[in-house]
Image: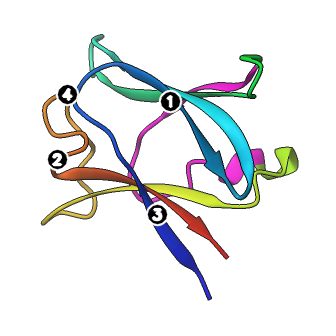
Amino acid sequence: MTTYYEVPLSGEAQTFTASMNGVSYTFTFRYLNCTQGGWVMDLADSSGNQIVGGIPLVTGTDLLGQYGYLGFGCRMFVSTDGDWDAVPTYDNLGTTSHLYVAID
């Protein structure tokens, strides 16, 4: 049985520590205001050592899928209310766009 958790976010750059599958990680979210723009996520260990950085918050895929060798033991995905495929914008992250962790 899969258990889903929503990562509480707001439409601003933020850093916090949370546990995924019993392991503590530091999450950093920032908005890159370049040509296309978009939210990215960095993951660090509990000592602040970066594990992976610049993961774009895109829809339709497991954000951690390509990092299976790192042993996160869960999946992460983004969805937007009313339009599953709509990418999070600067203004709607945490309100109508949501980040979920799925633990099998």
Query: Is residue 18 in the magenta section?
Result: no
Circle 3: residue type: Tyr
Q: Which residue is mark 2?
A: 95
In this rendering, which labeled residue sits more in front, label 2 or label 4?
2
101 in relation to 9, above or below: below
**In the rendered image, which residue does mark 3 sit on?**
5
Residue 90: assigned label: 4
**Which residue reaches farthest top?**
34
Residue under the point 12% across and 66% down: 82
Are circles 1 and 4 on residues that touch, CB within 8 Å?
no
Of badges 1 and 3, the one in the foreground is 3
Q: Which of the numbered marks, if any, corresponds to residue 41?
A: 1
Residue 52 among magenta residues: yes
| x and y, in percent, of residue 36 in the image | 27, 22
Count neighbours of disc 4 (C-alpha within 10 A) and say few if under 14, some if 14 to 19, many if 20 or more.
Answer: some
Q: Which residues are magenta?
A: 50-67
Instruction: Give the mark nearer the N terminus: 3 vs 4.
Output: 3
Distance between the alpha carbons at the discs numbered 2 and 4? 11 Å
Residue at point 16%, 40% (across, down) = 92
Residue located farthest toward the bottom when viewing the structure as drawn: 1
Q: Earlier in the sequence, mark 2 or mark 3?
A: 3
Q: Earlier in the sequence, mark 2 or mark 4?
A: 4
Q: Residue at x 67, y 76 (%)?
A: 104
The answer to whether residue 21 shows anywhere in this view is yes
